[in-house]
Amino acid sequence: MSDEAATKPKRKIRHLGILTGGGDCPGLNAVIRGAVLTAAREGVRVTGVRNAFAGLLHKSYIQLEPDTVEDLLQRGGTYLGSSNRDNPFAYPMTIDGQQRVVDVSDTIISNFREAGLDGLIAVGGDGTLAITYGLSQKGLPAICVPKTIDNDLLATDVTFGFDTAVGTATEAIDRIRTTAESHGRLMVVEVMGRNAGWIALFCGLSGGADVILLPEIPFSMEAIAAKLREDRASGKRFSIIVVAEGAHLKGGDVVVRALVNDPTEPRRLGGVGNLVGQKLEEMTGIETRVTILGHIQRGGTPSTYDRNLSTRFGVHAALNAIAGNFGHLVALKHGGIALVPLGEAAKGQRLVPLDSDFIRVGRSVGISFGDEE
């Protein structure tokens, strides 16, 4: 469905709510700003819901006016706060002294109506989409905006936050490269991305990595060691390896940093960079250092691309909500804005295809993906 549907209101919308769910991401504030400024011009009030769905449960709101959001465009993080542990269908509560998981979705919907809201704009990743879809099935009028630095949502060509994260990681690799060259070292850089390798692939290419390890391509330590020895034999004094946190050995599983009490994502990935670095130093004798970029990739000022994409998403989300086009995700499709039914948007994960031209280009310039025999 094209965004032209936003031009024909189905019923009068006077009051919208907006929340940001999941991990923080550069561009969230630009979405909020775009939605609020657009709604104001249409005579529609916007109330911010603090800390994702927990704000609806605990009735924690803030009135958003144009002068409230005007300076949010360049700010990272989220003005409304966020949470990735407050799934209303599996909400952790202490009952009779015991920790239990309960369904509070009916309370969420009741509080939504009590607040006088006519519709909700939910900004988030796959977890937020799934929750919003579940609530919409129970009658909550909602529209979603796709967000994640991982760029792994199937329903949209790209998510905001990804461009900024790749830029941050590339800058870090550029800095690491100079010290690697100075000392003739092997430098391993671990980046985020969960089970998708988009960040690793893009910053590895732009940072001139020698090896890129992706979750989509199980790797072999022997293949990587052979690549490093070949480079050394040709006269290269240093090497850069970029590894996605979800990358894993052939026949192996992902490296889990911790198990947490989170029904939506109990495994915290991380540590594969240390595993790769330690093993390669043992196998090759090359002095190795490991850098885990972690949440540095989530923070900071959003890039120009992410500011513009976020603003577009916020504007079109508001226009469609005002038109009553609920039950959809506002997505980027072939450069334009389109509406995708939430039931479809909440399914699947966008992984790097093995026939990606970016992988082909990487191989052509001599990058190893750790799968060579």
Image (tube, rainbow, N blue to C red):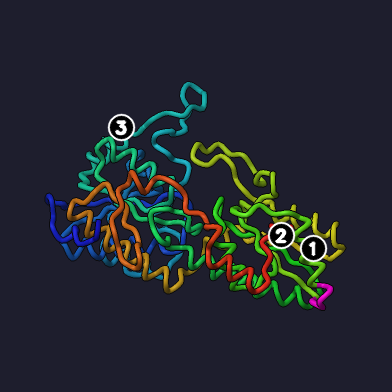
Q: Amino acid at mark 3?
A: Asp
Determine contact: label 1, label 2, CB under 8 Å: yes
SS at mark 2 in the image: loop
Q: Earlier in the sequence, mark 3 or mark 2?
A: 3
User: How far is the residue under mark 1 from the one under mark 2?
Assistant: 9 Å
Residue 182 seen in the current view: yes
Residue contact between numbered discs 3 and 1, judged by CB atoms under 8 Å: no
Q: Residue 84 placed where, x, y %?
A: 47, 45
| Gap between marks 3 and 2 measured at Cα | 53 Å
Instruction: Indicate the amino acid at tag 1.
Output: Ala
**Which label's residue is closer to the chain start, 1 or 2?**
1
Quickly name the residue at label 2: 372
Q: Is residue 125 magenta?
A: no
Q: Residues within 10 Å of mark 2 (few under 14, many from 20)?
A: few
Q: Is residue 289 positioned above or below 196 on the image?
A: below
Q: CA distance from mark 3 to mark 1?
A: 58 Å
Choose the circle earlier in sequence order: 3 or 1: 3
Residues tagged 3 and 2 counted as in contact (Cβ below 8 A) = no
Q: Which residue is mark 1?
A: 226
Left or right of 47 on screen, residue 85: right
Judge whether 96 appears above or below 300 on screen: above
Which residues are drawn in magenta? 232-236
What residue is disc 3 on? 106
